[in-house]
Image (cartoon, helix red, strand yellow):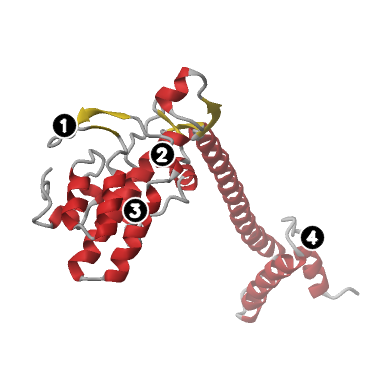
Amino acid sequence: MRDPDDNLDALLRSALGTQGTAAEEEHIFSDVWSRVQTSIDDGVTTSDDIVQERRLSLIGDREVAARRRRRATRLASAALAIAVAGGGTAVAAEFISTRTGEELTGWEIEAGGTGEVLNMGGTDRAQVFDEVTADIPFPPGYEEQRTYALEFHPSEPDHAITEGTLRSWMARNAVCTWADAWVAADNVGDVTARTAAATTLAEAVSWEDIRANDRPDAMDHPTTGERRSYNGWIPPLAAAAEAGDRAGVLDAVAYSAACSHEVLPVIDTVPDYIWAGTR
């Protein structure tokens, strides 16, 4: 004769239709059996109907919970997929390339400069501008001034600048900072630093971005009346720095029409600079 416990085991196992793993099914079975056994030990009469009712109730609860977990997981996965896909689409739609692959031709070169036309409203503008001008030297400690020069032009999609014009702009600002570094060294009597700045200023006279992108200035010198080019102030600046002529350095910077106070953190504070503190 078959053991009644075997019949009950078979009954319980036959009801495990949750499609769970073997471990999960064994856990459910053990839980149900434990409760039934407790009832028997407590002297409670447990009929097949009561056992069946408890079994169905327990397994039903577990199945509902399992379905809820599976549904929540599917919804979370779907939401994540939509978010990733949507985000990727948004990024792709908003990206504007700074590099256009185009160059000016004919008379446009004289007006706009040489090299590739760059979109000033490009998404990757900061990276591209930095790469294009990376070899133009600024003095140590003048990173903030370099950043100012890089970010000066309006960041708008309907504005453009050529590589040649950008490099010329950055080169002029670099010269301004080297003049500032010269004065900073002169203020503290640092001959080594002042000589290094003077050497760079002498080299700047021949920089391609200074020499090739120079144009006649539309204004006369305010004191001499001399008509010079946009970069015509650089040779006198270099000569004054080489000679140790502080007044000559400050005058060249003052009448450059290129050096704003944003790139002259030291010169803008010295009393012998004509535009000190002027905004």
**Neighbour tally class for label 3: few under 14, some 14-19, many 20 plus, Cα within 10 Å:** many
Badge 2 vs badge 3, beta-carbon distance below 8 Å = no
**Which of the pair 71/129 is nearer the observer?**
129
Q: Secondary structure at mark 4?
A: helix
- Nearer the camera: disc 1 or disc 4: 1
Q: Which residue is mark 3?
A: 201
Q: CA distance from mark 3 to mark 4?
A: 92 Å
Q: Which residue is mark 4?
A: 14
**Neighbour tally class for label 1: few under 14, some 14-19, many 20 plus, Cα within 10 Å:** few
Q: Is residue 118 above or below residue 267?
A: above
What amino acid is found at the position of numbered circle 1 in the picture? Answer: Gly
Q: CA distance from mark 4 to mark 2?
A: 92 Å
Is 208 on the left-hand or right-hand side of 215?
right
Q: Which residue is mark 2?
A: 211
Quadrant for the N terminus in the image: bottom right
Give the residue drawn at x 30%, y 45%.
Answer: 234
